[in-house]
Amino acid sequence: MGSTLSTVLLTAPLAFLAGWLLGKVVFQRMSVVRPNQGAGAATQKVVPDGEPAPGQKDLASTRTEVQLLKEALAERDQVVRDLREKLTARVSPLEDTPVNATVQYTKLKETVQALREGLASKEKQLENMQAAVDKANEKTAQMHQRLQSWRVRIKPLAKQFRQQKMIIGELHEELKVREMRQRALEEKHNIKAAPEPTPVEKAGNSHSKELLAIQGIGPALQKKLSKLGIDKLQQLADMDSAELLAVGQSLSISAARMKKNDWAGQARKLLNLPTAQNVVESAEKEAAAIAG
């Protein structure tokens, strides 16, 4: 419908122009013929006898005028045809058939649909990426919060660790001093308990009962210890783990059994002396008190 309307709008001015040109041509032809008629009428009056009558001349002029009109109409028709052909040549490329319009509409519809699908896919990808970014930001915030919490908690723990380390160092030094004292005492006891010709057995017998109070030491093992010069609880109480293991090896006693029996610990308990476990527990209590 749009193509037809455009054709009408273009054809109407051209038809008007063709009519105007045709009228102008006819007017010019008639203006040329009528003066000739007037001249013929004037000459008819003076024409001698034997020439055509005035009515015949009018008929001839009318026929001539009709012929001229026919020629003018033919020229007009030719001009209209030429203009119509030119108009058709110009307008026809703009016109589309219903089939072509349908094909173009289908292609445009498919293109628009593809663009919409691509846009929807891109929007979905953008939403997924935004969700991933939000999740990563949330995890980062949580990790940052945990880090700040650990920093707050580590400060007192680090201080407490340094204090406990210092206390442990002091306890180690104290243990070393005690070991040195114990060794000095052992040397003194060994010197004092040097065997004499006859009273050694009596002395050994007097102290042998002390060792029998320890679980894991029987009469046979007591005699072996006595031969090694060990017949007092104090001697066992003053020994460290390395010395006890050495005594156990000399007596063919396994290290596991020596650790299980813990002769030194039993001797300290019998003598009411602080054991290694008591020392460690007291050290831990002191460290906890300082940390608190």
Image (spheres, rainbow, N blue to C red):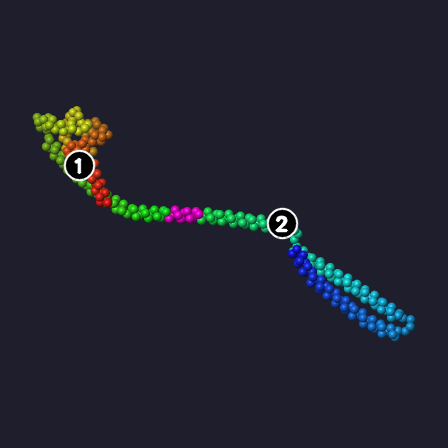
Query: x, y percentage for residue 163?
Result: 23, 45
Left or right, residue 148 beside residue 2: left
Cα separation, mark 1 vs mark 2, equals 106 Å
Say the numbered circle drawn on residue 274: 1
| Residue 219 visible (yes or no) | yes
Quarter the C terminus occupies: top left
- Kindly identify the amino acid type of the residue bearing the numbered disc 1: Pro
Say which residue appears at 62% left-offset and 49% top-offset: 103
- Quarter of the picture containing the N terminus is bottom right
Q: Position of residue 108 (x, y in %)?
A: 59, 51
Span of residues in magenta: 131-141
| Up/down of 117 relative to 14, above or below | above
Residue 93: tell me if it is visible: no
**Residue 190 rendering spot, x and y as whole percentages:** 12, 32
Q: Residue at x 58, y 48 (%)?
A: 110
Mark 2: few, some, or many residues within 10 Å (few <14, many ≥20)? few
Q: Around disc 1, counting alpha carbons within 10 Å, would you say few (fewer than 14), some (14 to 19), or many (20 or more)?
A: few
Q: Are marks 1 and 2 in contact (CB under 8 Å)?
A: no
Report if residue 133 lies within the magenta region: yes
> Residue 284 bears which disc, if any?
none
